[in-house]
Amino acid sequence: MERRASELEPLICKARKYVVLMAGYDPGIHLGSSLSVMEIVAALYGTGRVKFNVANGVHNRNYFVLSKGHAIHAVYALAAAMGYLTLDELRETGSLGSRLQNHPEVDTPFVDVANSGSLGQGISLAVGLALGLKIRGEKGRVYLVVGDGELDEGQSWESFAVAAHYGLTNLVTIVDLNGVQLDGHSEEVLRKGDLAGRFRSLGYEVFEVDGHDVGQIVSALERAENAGRPAVINAKTVRGRGVAEIEDTAKQRLSRDDALRYAGNIC
């Protein structure tokens, strides 16, 4: 079911609560990253650009590559909010035998690409997938979500250069610019400089949005899809959005009591 941007807010609120609840049951999840990317994921799934119930191998469909695979809990939470997973399954995330692990795997539901390797690999996979679709003449589009921290990797920029070189208009990249990575604030770890300028120098159409305004994201997606060249959306976000204790920090963990408290008041 496709929804307008204005109809996505209740889903986003519910999904945000679910992510925090999962952190209460499994403090090892990447809570901050999952919260920062929530509106981006909702803009893709909620508008029907990508779907939860499409099997791998189906032709002429869109694909979703979450290169920052550690934020997979945003996908799980939104799937539950939209009725594709149960709360019981969410409570078991990361547990032995659960199909909802803390990084995407081959048998993880709703995942086109099992990307649990080094950051930046998902970008290469997405570019290869988009190039393959173009060569085969298929209509599908690839939506790629990356973190700003993985843009430290040389592999990332080599892949983006390949996409621009081959004119992959079927690739739309969204950068989750939450400003924080494992070792601290991204600008302190490795300055990115003029990120929009770097993409433009390769030949990308660049859009910049508030990554917590789902309406802005959906509007940018519409423009990116009609740009006539590879497009990137730089989405400015806050890591840990809605959980004051971890917002804009590299902190991850909440006690179960804190998780329940935040889940009750996050929206």
Image (cartoon, rainbow, N blue to C red):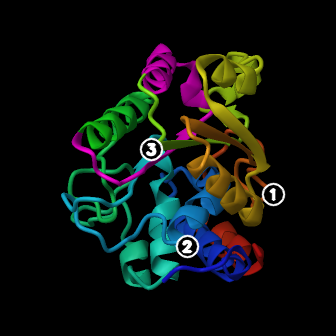
Q: Is residue 219 above or below residue 163?
A: below
Q: Residue at x 65, y 62 (%)?
A: 39
Q: Earlier in the sequence, mark 3 or mark 1?
A: 3
Whether residue 121 is visible, yes or no, is: yes
In this rendered view, identify the residue nearer to me: 76 or 252: 76
- Of marks 1 and 2, which one's residue comes earlier in the chain? 2
Q: Magenta stretch? A: 136-165
Q: Secondary structure at mark 3?
A: loop
Measure how far apart labels 3 and 2 are at the Cα level. 20 Å
Q: Amino acid at mark 3?
A: Asn
- For disc 1, the neighbor class at 10 Å (few under 14, some 14 to 19, many from 20) is few
The reply to whether discs 3 and 1 touch (Cβ–Cβ < 8 Å) is no
Q: Which mark is residue 46?
A: 2
Between disc 3 and disc 1, the foreground one is 3
Identify the residue under disc 1.
244
Q: In the image, 229: left or right of 209?
A: left
Question: Regarding mark 1 in the picture, which secondary structure is present there?
Answer: loop
User: Residue 95 sits in which quadrant?
Assistant: bottom left
Q: Is residue 50 left or right of residue 194?
A: left
The reply to whether callout 3 and callout 2 are in contact (CB within 8 Å) is no
How packed mark 3 is, by other alpha carbons closer than 10 Å (few <14, some 14-19, many 20 or more), is many
Q: Position of residue 117 (x, y in %)?
A: 34, 33
Residue 141: say if magenta.
Answer: yes
Amino acid tagged 1? Ala
Residue at x 71%, y 41% (from the top left corner): 178
Q: Nearer the viewer, residue 130 or 178?
A: 130
Amino acid of disc 2: Gly
Give the residue pinned by disc 3: 170
